[in-house]
Image (cartoon, grey):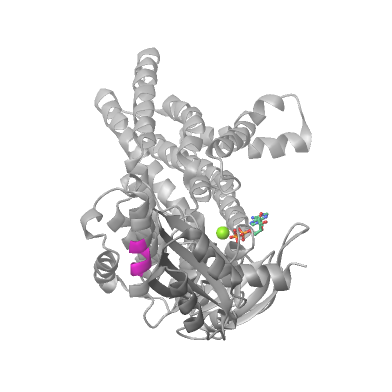
C-alpha cells in the first residue's frame, strides 16, 4: 500500500510539473465555457445533460494525451529498468500508475463542478441527473484512462501510444454509427460495447447496474492486461 | 552470495549468453570485463531480475531469483548502463521515491536520503531538477539511488562511461567509499578501470566467460617484465647496446634531444642488470634513471585473449 501511494504521489508530482497538465486544464475549461453558454442560451431550461455529452467527446481526445507517457516514457528513458528492479510488485506498479492518472483526471472533473454551481444559480437543475451525470463521466474517464495506460505499456513511443488509444476509443465511441442498420445479436453486443450508450443513461439520471458493470469490468480488464504487458519484458 | 549456474540467454535465435556459471562470495569485488556487445549488460539484467534467463539458475543469498524475485531485489542495488533518472524530479524527490520503493522504513527515509546525499556529494544540488545536472552529477545521483537502502549486493553497469577524467576519478573514489562490506559487481570495457577497483575479474567475450581469476594472479601469470631506461648520450651507440643484448626481447626508443627513454621487455627471471649498465657506461652514455614497470591488465588481457583463446 505504501508503495502504491509513493507511485501515485510521484505520478501526480510529475503531472503537475509538466505543461500538458495545464494545457489540458485550459482546453477543458475553454471548451466548457463555449459549450456551456451556448447550451444555456439554446434551451432555456438549464441542464447539464448536454454538457456531459460534450465532455465525453472532449475527454476522448484529451485522455490519450494524459496517459500516453505513463509507461512509454519510462521505457524510453530507461527508468522502467529502475522501477522493475526495485522490490515493487507488478500489481503495485500498475495500480500506482493508474490511480495517479485517475486522480489527476478527477482534479479536472472537480474543476468543472464550478459550472454546476453556476447552473444552480440560474435555475433549478435536476440535482439527481447532475449527480449521476458526474458519476457517469467520471466512470467513463476512468475507463478511458485504463485504456490509455494499457496502450502506453505496449510501446516506448508516446505518439504510438496515443494513436493506439485513439483507435480504440474511436471504435468504442463511434461503433453505434456503423451498426445502426444491423439487427439482432450483433446489434445488441455492439450497442452494449459502445461507450456513448452508457453515458447517455447516466446523463439522463438513470443508473443501471449494467452501465456500472460495463465501466468497471472494462477498467479491470485493462488493468489486468497492463499487468501482463509489463511482465512480458524479454 | 551470488550463484549463477549454466545461464543461457537467447534473443530470438541470437545467443547473448552461453552457459555462464560462477559464484561470488560475500564481500567480493568483481569486475565484468569485455568489449561492447560481449553480454555484460545482459548478464547484469538477469542478476537484477530485469530479464529472465532462457535457461539456468541464479541465486542471491540463497534465494532463487525467479521464485523469490522481490526478496532478491530487496538485497540488490543496481545502477543500469543509462542511469535511470526522472528528469523533472529534484534530486531529493527522486531519492525519496527510490527509498519508498525500496522498502526503507518511512521513519528512516529522510535519514537515508541525507546520508546518500552526503556520501555522493550531492548536498548542494539536492533541490535542483535532475534534468539540469551535468553528466557527472547525474551519474552520482544514479549511484546514490542504488545505495539508498544499504543493499548487500551492488551491481554497477559501466559507472564511468562517458565521463571526463575528473568525473571518472570522483566516481571511482565514490565507489571505493561505498563498497565497504558489500558484494560489488562492476562492469566495464576499460581495463584500467577494473584494475583499480576490483579484486577479481571475469572476462566475458561473445557471451562466454573466458577468464575468471583474481587480478593479482592474472598479473603474475604474465612472465615478462618491463623496464624503462632513461639514458643520455649518442643515440646510435645506445641503440647498439640494447639491440646487441641477447636477453632483451624487444625494445622501443623515445628520444628527446640526447635523452632517450628506452622501453625494454625481458623475461621475468632476468638478472643481468649490471652487465647492461656496464655496457651503457662503456658506450660513453650516462644512465639517468631505471624503472621497472608493472604489467598492466591491458597487456595481460591482450596476450591472453589473442594467444590462448582466439584461434
Ligand atoms: N533486448 C535485446 N534484444 C536483442 N538483442 C539484444 C538485447 N539486448 C542485448 N542484445 C544483444 O546481446 C548482445 C550483448 O549485449 P549487451 O549485454 O548489451 O553487451 P555489453 O553490455 O557487454 O556491451 C549484443 O549483441 C546485443 O546486441
Ligand atoms: Mg553494456
From the image, which quarter does the C terminus of chain A lie in? bottom right
Q: Which residues are magenta?
A: B169-174
Confirm whether residue A72 shows in the render.
yes
From the image, which quarter does the N terminus of chain A lie in? bottom left
The image quadrant in which ligand 2 is located:
bottom right
Confirm whether residue A89 shows in the render.
no
The spot of residue A169 in percent (x, y) is 59, 35
Up/down of B285 relative to B29, above or below = above
Q: Nearer the viewer, residue A154 or A96?
A: A154
Q: Nearer the viewer, residue B254 or B75?
A: B254
The spot of residue B290 in percent (x, y) is 41, 74
Q: Nearer the viewer, residue B21 or A183?
A: B21
**Quarter occupied by residue A104:** top left
Q: Nearer the viewer, residue B36 or B139?
A: B36
The spot of residue B81 in percent (x, y) is 50, 58
Characterize the magenta stretch by its predominant secondary structure: helix
In the image as oriented, which residue stretches furthest toward the top? A42
Which residue is located at x 54 percent, y 42 percent?
A148
The mark total stands at: 0
Q: Is residue B81 left or right of residue B16?
A: left
Which residue is located at x 43 percent, y 60 percent?
B160
Q: Is residue A121 left or right of residue A158?
A: left
Up/down of A156 relative to A181, above or below = below
Q: Is residue B212 left or right of residue A99?
A: right
Which residue is located at x 36 percent, y 66 percent?
B100
Is residue B222 magenta-colored? no
The spot of residue A73 in percent (x, y) is 49, 46
Amino acid at each position: 500500500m505504501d508503495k502504491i501511494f509513493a507511485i501515485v504521489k510521484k505520478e501526480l508530482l510529475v503531472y503537475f510539473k509538466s505543461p500538458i497538465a495545464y494545457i489540458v486544464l485550459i482546453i477543458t475549461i475553454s471548451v466548457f465555457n463555449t459549450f456551456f453558454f451556448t447550451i444555456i442560451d439554446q434551451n432555456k431550461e438549464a441542464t447539464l445533460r448536454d454538457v456531459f455529452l460534450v465532455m465525453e467527446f472532449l475527454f476522448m481526445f484529451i485522455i490519450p494525451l494524459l496517459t500516453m507517457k505513463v509507461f512509454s516514457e519510462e521505457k524510453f528513458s530507461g527508468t522502467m529498468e529502475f522501477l522493475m528492479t526495485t522490490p515493487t510488485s507488478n500489481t503495485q506498479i500498475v495500480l500506482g500508475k493508474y490511480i495517479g492518472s485517475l486522480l489527476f483526471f478527477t482534479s479536472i472533473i472537480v474543476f468543472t463542478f464550478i459550472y454546476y454551481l453556476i447552473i444552480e444559480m440560474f435555475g433549478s437543475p435536476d440535482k439527481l441527473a447532475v449527480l449521476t451525470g458526474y458519476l457517469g463521466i467520471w466512470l467513463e474517464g476512468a475507463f478511458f484512462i485504463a485504456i490509455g495506460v494499457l496502450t502506453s505499456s505496449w510501446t516506448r513511443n508516446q505518439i504510438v501510444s496515443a494513436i493506439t488509444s485513439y483507435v480504440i476509443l474511436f471504435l468504442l465511441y463511434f461503433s453505434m454509427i456503423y451498426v445502426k442498420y444491423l439487427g439482432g445479436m450483433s446489434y445488441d453486443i455492439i450497442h452494449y460495447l459502445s461507450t456513448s450508450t452508457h453515458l447517455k443513461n447516466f446523463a439522463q439520471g438513470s443508473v443501471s447496474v449494467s452501465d456500472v458493470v460495463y465501466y468497471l469490468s472494462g477498467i479491470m480488464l485493462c488493468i489486468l492486461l497492463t499487468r501482463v504487458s509489463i511482465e512480458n519484458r524479454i | 552470495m551470488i550463484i549463477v549456474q549454466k545461464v543461457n540467454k537467447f534473443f530470438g535465435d541470437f545467443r547473448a549468453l552461453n552457459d555462464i556459471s560462477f559464484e561470488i562470495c560475500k564481500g567480493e569485488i568483481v569486475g565484468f570485463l569485455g568489449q561492447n556487445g560481449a553480454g555484460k549488460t545482459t548478464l547484469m539484467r538477469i542478476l537484477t531480475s530485469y530479464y529472465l534467463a532462457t535457461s539456468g539458475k541464479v541465486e542471491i543469498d540463497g534465494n532463487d531469483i525467479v521464485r523469490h524475485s522481490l526478496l532478491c531485489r530487496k538485497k540488490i542495488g543496481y545502477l543500469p548502463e543509462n542511469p535511470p533518472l526522472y528528469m523533472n524530479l529534484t534530486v531529493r524527490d527522486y531519492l525519496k521515491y527510490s527509498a519508498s520503493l525500496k522498502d526503507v522504513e518511512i521513519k528512516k527515509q529522510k535519514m537515508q536520503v541525507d546520508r546518500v546525499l552526503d556520501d555522493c556529494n550531492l548536498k548542494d544540488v539536492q533541490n535542483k531538477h535532475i534534468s539540469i545536472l551535468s553528466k557527472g552529477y547525474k551519474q552520482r545521483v544514479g549511484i546514490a539511488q542504488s545505495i539508498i537502502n544499504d543493499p548487500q549486493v551492488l551491481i554497477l553497469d559501466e559507472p564511468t562511461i562517458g565521463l571526463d577524467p575528473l568525473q571518472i576519478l570522483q566516481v571511482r573514489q565514490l565507489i571505493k567509499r561505498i563498497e565497504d562490506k558489500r558484494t560489488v559487481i562492476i562492469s566495464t570495457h576499460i581495463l584500467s578501470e577494473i584494475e583499480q577497483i576490483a579484486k577479481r575479474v571475469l572476462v566475458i567475450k561473445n557471451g562466454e566467460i573466458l577468464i575468471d581469476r583474481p587480478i593479482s594472479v592474472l598479473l603474475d601469470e604474465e612472465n615478462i617484465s618491463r623496464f624503462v631506461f632513461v639514458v643520455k648520450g649518442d643515440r646510435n651507440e645506445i641503440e647498439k647496446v640494447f639491440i646487441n643484448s641477447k636477453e632483451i626481447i624487444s625494445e622501443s626508443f623515445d628520444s628527446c634531444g640526447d635523452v632517450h627513454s628506452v622501453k625494454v621487455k625481458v623475461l621475468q627471471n632476468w638478472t643481468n642488470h649490471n652487465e647492461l649498465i656496464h655496457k651503457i657506461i662503456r658506450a660513453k652514455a650516462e644512465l639517468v634513471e631505471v624503472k621497472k614497470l608493472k604489467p598492466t591488465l591491458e597487456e595481460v588481457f591482450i596476450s591472453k585473449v589473442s594467444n590462448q583463446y582466439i584461434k
